[in-house]
Image: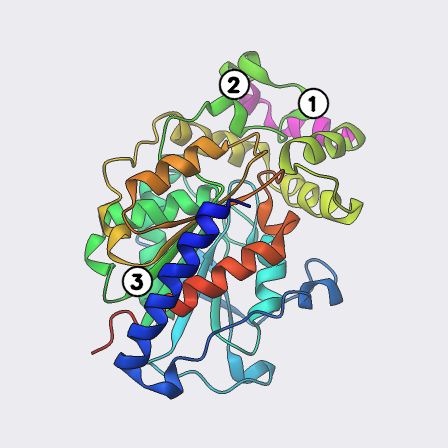
Amino acid sequence: MSVKGRIFGTVVGAAGLVAAAGAVGIARQNRVIGHRVAGELVAFGELRSPARVVVTDDALDLHVEIDEPEDFGGVPATEDDLTVVFVHGYALNLDCWHFQRAAYRGQVRTVFYDQRSHGRSPRSSEERCTIEQLGHDLRRVIEDTVPGRCVVIGHSMGGMSVMSLAQHHPELFGDTVVGAALISTSAGGLDPGRVLFPMLPLGMGGRFMARAVRTLDLGHRVVDLARSWGHAVADVLTDRYAFGDDVPASHVEFVYSMLAATPFAVVADFYPAFATLDHADHLEPLGRVPTSVICGTADKITSVSHSRELHSRIPGSSLLECEGAGHMVLLERHKEVTAELDDLLSLAQGQGLP
């Protein structure tokens, strides 16, 4: 963990809480503190709420689940309360937020959805598999599921969706969107080949495979079969590229199951978006609200340098570096990540209120 980042977040968080107290009174300044071990009490993939649909601009039905506080022993949310919208990453699905979802159940209203072509959401046309479109999708999710103010939290490609929202819908930031978290993500300058690990068949990767993505896509059913044959190798690659330190085998298998459930055709559809990604000059809206940048120092997919660059470009942002953690820091160091999100939600509670 970055000591500098933690101190910065704590100081700013304290100042934000004081401001919130003056704005909304003692009753509204209670900190949200997630139950950080709750996710360890339930198996991966078993946290569910009734399915809902959000229709995108191009008439795609996104799979959405909302955890209402009162459904899990909490006080019913009002329009003055925050909604927290979680946006998952490339080749994953909403289940990846397992620990954060468990931590906040019954305490805060949370929204989870599968991005287009991922999880339980239907396949998108190839031409709509862009980061710009993902930002528009996030706007539709907010419009349909958030009655008042929200905090948006994105991991990897989900963080890019949040940055796309800031670029294409900046008017939302400050009134509707009152906080953001960018986890293991980048505003641009990625090596696209690295983004594919560990999603390639039988452990093949590097520059050759990066150039050959489209060729592989022509035979994507064979690639999917090869991925299933190479389960043992893929487990090793998932462990190596998704995590930094040793993690329980169940964590590796959980991430692999999400990757394996994503057809290679979907992987190929989104791949070009990473090569052209460039949000670096469109981050200003994120500087209007409390923003937390979170990463692992051993991230082999979006290296820590990308998070440091985001932190330097977003005025007032906090930076949490989890020493030795990898790309799936939200699983690997879930207690640290949830603690950082606690601080972010506390800051955001006083935003946008008279």
Secondary element type, mark 3: strand
Q: Position of residue 199 (x, y in %)?
A: 62, 31
Closer to the camera in the image, 11 or 143:
11
| Residue in the image at 41% along x and 40% along y | 125
Q: Measured along the vertical axis of the image, is residue 174 above or below residue 136?
A: below
In the picture, the disc for residue 203 is: 1
Q: Position of residue 208 (x, y in %)?
A: 56, 11
Q: Which residue is mark 3?
A: 177
Judged left or right of residue 199, residue 191 is left
In the rendered image, which quarter is residue 189 located in? top left
| Residue in the image at 53% along x and 77% along y | 107
Q: Earlier in the sequence, mark 2 or mark 3?
A: 3
Q: Mark 1 and mark 2: span between their CA atoms?
A: 13 Å
In the rendered image, which quarter is residue 354 located in? bottom left
Q: Mark 2 and mark 3: span between their CA atoms?
A: 36 Å
| Residue in the image at 30% along x and 32% along y | 278
Q: Amino acid at mark 2?
A: Ala
Secondary element type, mark 2: helix
Q: Which residue is mark 2?
A: 210
